[in-house]
Amino acid sequence: MIRARNLPFVATVLIFLIAYGLCALQFPNMLSFRVVGNLLTDNAFLGIAAVGMTFVILSGGIDLSVGSVIAFTSVFVAVLIRAGVHPALAFGLALIVSTGFGALMGLTIHALKMPAFVVTLAGMFLARGAAFLISTDSVPISHEFLKTLKGLFIQLPDKGKLSFLAIVMLLAFALGVVLAHRTRFGANVYALGGSEQSAELMGVPLRRTMIQLYAFSGFMAGLAGLAYTLYTSAGYSLATVGVELDAIAAVVVGGTLLTGGSGLVLGTLFGVLIQGLIQTYIVFDGTLSSWWTKIVVGLLLFAFIVLQRLILLISERRAAMRSAAGE
Amino acid sequence: MTHDALLSAQGIDKSFFGVKVLDGVDFTLRAGEIHALLGENGAGKSTLVKILTGAYRRDAGQMHLAGAEVEPRSVAEAQNLGIGTVYQEVNLLDNLTVAENLYLGRQPRWMGLTDRRRMRADAHELLARYHVTADPDETLAHYPVAVRQIIAIARAVDLSGKVLFLDEPTASLDAREVQSLFDVLHQLRQQGLGIVIITHFLDQVYQIADRVTVLRNGRMVGSRAISELPRRDLVSMMLGRELAEATGHRDPDATEPDTAAAFKFENYGKRGSIAPFDLAIRPGEVVGIAGLLGSGRTETARLLFGIDRPDSGQATVDDHPVSLHSPEEAIAHGFGMCPEERKSDGIVGDLSVRQNIVLALQATRGWARPIPRREADALATQYIQALDIRPPDPDRPIKFLSGGNQQKAILARWLATEPRLLILDEPTRGIDIGAHAEIINLIGKLRAEGMALVVISSEIEELVAFSTRVIVLSDRHHVRELKGAEITAEAIVEAMAVPGEAA
Amino acid sequence: MKKFRQLRPQLLALAVVLVMVGLISPGFFSVTVQNGRLYGSLIDVGVRVAPVALLAIGMTLVIATKGIDLSVGAVMAITGAVAATLVADGHSVPVVLAVSLALGLLCGIWNGVLVAFLDIQPIIATLILMVAGRGIAQLITGGVILTFNDPAFSFIGSGAVLGIPMPILIWLAMGLAVGLLVRRSALGLLIEAVGINRRASMLVGVRARFLILATYAISGLCAAMAGMIVTADIHGADANNAGLWLELDAILAVVIGGTSLAGGRFSITASLIGALIIQALNTGILMSGWPPEFNLIVKAVVIVTILTLQSPAVADELTMLRDFLRRKGAQK
């Protein structure tokens, strides 16, 4: 039997499979490992960022700084590499900066008791501004190390490739799943999303969890920035504007409750894939414009928000009926 | 003989903002007993529990656990000492699974990762001891409150293991669920735990408790074995008067008017809230509502004012059937209500006294017909003077006024709408003596002017003083109606002690 | 002048910003008249602030009810696209305005229904239109930047009456109109009551759902007007960029204006001054010759400072500090 809490996840997977099936009926070519490989590669940076966003949303928070942090990381890394720093070192530095930035936001949210929305909004401006300060131009990069990384892939049947980026994204999701379901940190994040007050009474360390949580989101945004840099072979401070919205949409369409406390990391993967699928379909069709993606994503958002509201209402009503029946 | 005290406290003092809420309270809990902690609102029960369970620090006094002096500085520390607490409903997480709720923060781990299989097995085993069959992997929200309650107890006992505090554990349970909860408590008592239960259901106190301690106004009234304490004596301990002398001064004019009933409620009730009742209210009378906390007083008020929807019965105003499904509808029929929770349901804190006074009138007029500034000023000035609201500054945000003055402003808010029926839920609670007397006088004055009033109060003398009739509630039933000379403190207390189902 | 005293922090901040900008670029305060129209940096601030000022008017009311409207930028794009399409098709200005403004109102009502009647959290409910809105706008324009050449419609963006540019007149008029609407009727009081204590308000018969719906509707209308100005100004509709991130500026303006994100007392005038502060900063940085990149950093610093001062944790500290100082003063 499907548990009620997993219903949105199941709906997401079904929607993805049915949509993929319909696409394949129209364009049989879409049913190939090559398309699947590309789907994963093209959405790798979004997927990685969405892993972090899933945790933040599960806790009942939100992180608007993601898109800016991706852009900052990409410029930061590109400028360092241009200056002759080895990419591996640059990557490491970038991840330290983005993780530290996230931790700082988490600390601010907790210490000042301010909504995550405003704190991360300030973070969004700050990271974007910092990226602008480093460079406003697109900084192309090339380095043997990067070429080696990009050359790594796992061969799939019929000329399909599981690229390095796709592998990193899948690893990020694997890490997310383990963190969410097999660590105390993960349980604490769900607990925060259920009720901060109850979580505190049950001994969840609020401050530590909050800092870890936003640090994790910052780390994932940094990693997404690295993936984006690798993907485009350049760093550009104007890039990835609004990616946080795509990530939020992926999380919600993936079945996570926007108010927190319920959802699966794996659902977000399907949320990302649904967005990618729409884009792939539009490419195959050739006549449709890319703006259909946003409309369909908006519709899906609406559908999932209403679905979850209904699930909540029904469970409340059931609970009420249960207690009334006992009278 | 002296039983070994498991947990004892002597001379506990606690003040908030200079107001003493606990004054030299002693408390002794023995191993293997179920101890009921009783008292009306504001008696200091919850403060005492919070001090004993580490949520608050005491100002003075001593605390011993199994002979050793202890001073828990946090809930977690108290837990480690062996003192566990189960709060009414907020201490578990509905969105986590049963197993996660039981083991949050202390999950069994294997190589740094949560060992879900062992956690599941442990949960199974633990719940089996409480005869609960719940799937450890199902979310807690899936289970009824009764099961959640037992899961919370299982967690608390597993964590602490010596003393268990239960705050209103039966508030939302039905009779069968209460019974299975009590079975669990009996089992724990046999294991030698000391259990403190806070409740306002006297029936249950007599059913489960071995001893009771009664608090009133921050002081300990007494601690007795339940077998030696008749129900009537217990009630008078809680209410704090020797029945013989509690006659109360009746307002000689508080007699039943000979007008026709303008507001009638027939077979009016709501399942799980208040049993169906009949009530007819005439202009020029004060219907007092008496009952202990949890007897259905506030529920009655909520139903009359349309905050809750009735699921049985019919209301009529001037012999016309009316629907009262929202405060708006009730207000349209000339109702007004001052709620019990003044801060959360009454005042609009950041608005000025004037704005708070005109708010209800403005709501009835609608947004498009604003009350002109001059009229608002006049109303504010009039009521500030008439009710002696201090400081007499209509521009001051109401949150900066004292409780009594806030209450007067809320009364003014309704008087400005010239209501026909005014429902007052605990109008004198938590306010100073001067304001107290003024509000009582006002009730008499409004009655004399022909208004119909329903006044809920836990101050029995007050009810005796101004009521033309008193309805007594017990266990969510209207059990008794007292009229004229029948209205004495003794009769009210007597009726309150009657179990509801019996009536 | 009680009103003036309440606005003092905002006016002071605006004055400081203006003086600083004036010091950096001396030509800032000079206003000239050319072809019967006022020109100058100061006038430019007034013109450029128009979209954010308009959004801030609606946003103030929404935030006063404890809500937030993330969709206003997208609504600007939608209504701009519709207006440009209608203008390009040769419809008259009144028809274009009526249809576009009605559409904005409709978008606001959609948000309002989700928030007030389906009880969906405002940030979530308005996110839907924020995401989908731009797509819808592009659907209308067919994915291209739609341009038109209609002097009558462009007048809204670049015309002037009595020498004063139209955008200035529009945001002033709208601010005045909404200000009068809420303060001369009981809307303002009731909105504040709902924002401060919704339960208590409903218990005295205030129709909270209707009021919340109304604030989102007004916000949608304001967004549509902002959309008209931008469309008329650039003689076309750019569905991708029209109103992009302006919702954040509008929220910032409201917050600078002192309306708490937790709802309650509000001041439209203060929000408008907040919008002016933001725009003066933008213009100032532009004129100072500093890279415009500084803009975002300055904004971030402003947000953090203001929010820190407003945050409950810090507010408690400040109150304690003030009491302490007062007591000390009393001892002397």
Image (tube, rainbow, N blue to C red):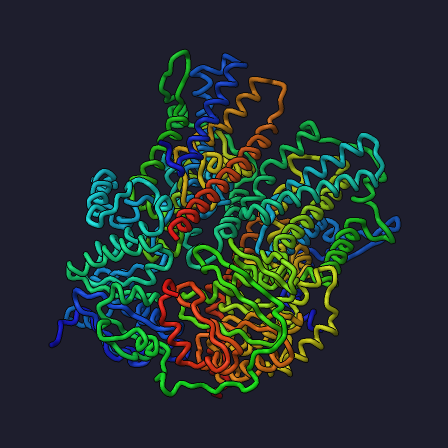
Is B197 positioned to the left or the right of C167 in the image?
left
Describe residue A233's horizontal placement relative to residue B332 as left or right: left
Q: Residue furthest left?
A: B1
Which quadrant of the rendered structure holds the N terminus of chain A? top left
Which sits in the foreground, B123 or C299?
A: B123
Q: Is residue C10 left or right of residue A28?
A: right
Q: Position of residue B502 (x, y in %)?
A: 36, 64
Residue A56 is at least partly visible in this image: no
Name the spot of residue B204 as percent of width and height, x first.
Answer: 30, 64
Residue at 30% x, 73% y is: B231
Above-or-below relation of C316 to C166: below
The image position of residue A286, as x and y in percent, is 60, 18
Q: Residue at x 69, y 57 (%)?
A: C272
- Residue B265 occupies which quadrant of the picture? bottom right
Left or right? Give the position of C231 relative to A30. Answer: right
Task: Report if residue A157 is visible in the image.
Answer: yes
A163 w.r.t. B65: above or below: above
A161 versus B52 height, above or below: above
Can you give x and y, in whole percent of width and height, for residue C91 in the image? Answer: 83, 34
Q: Which residue is rendered at x = 64% and y = 77% of the image?
A: B450
Q: Nearer the viewer, residue B241 or C320?
A: B241
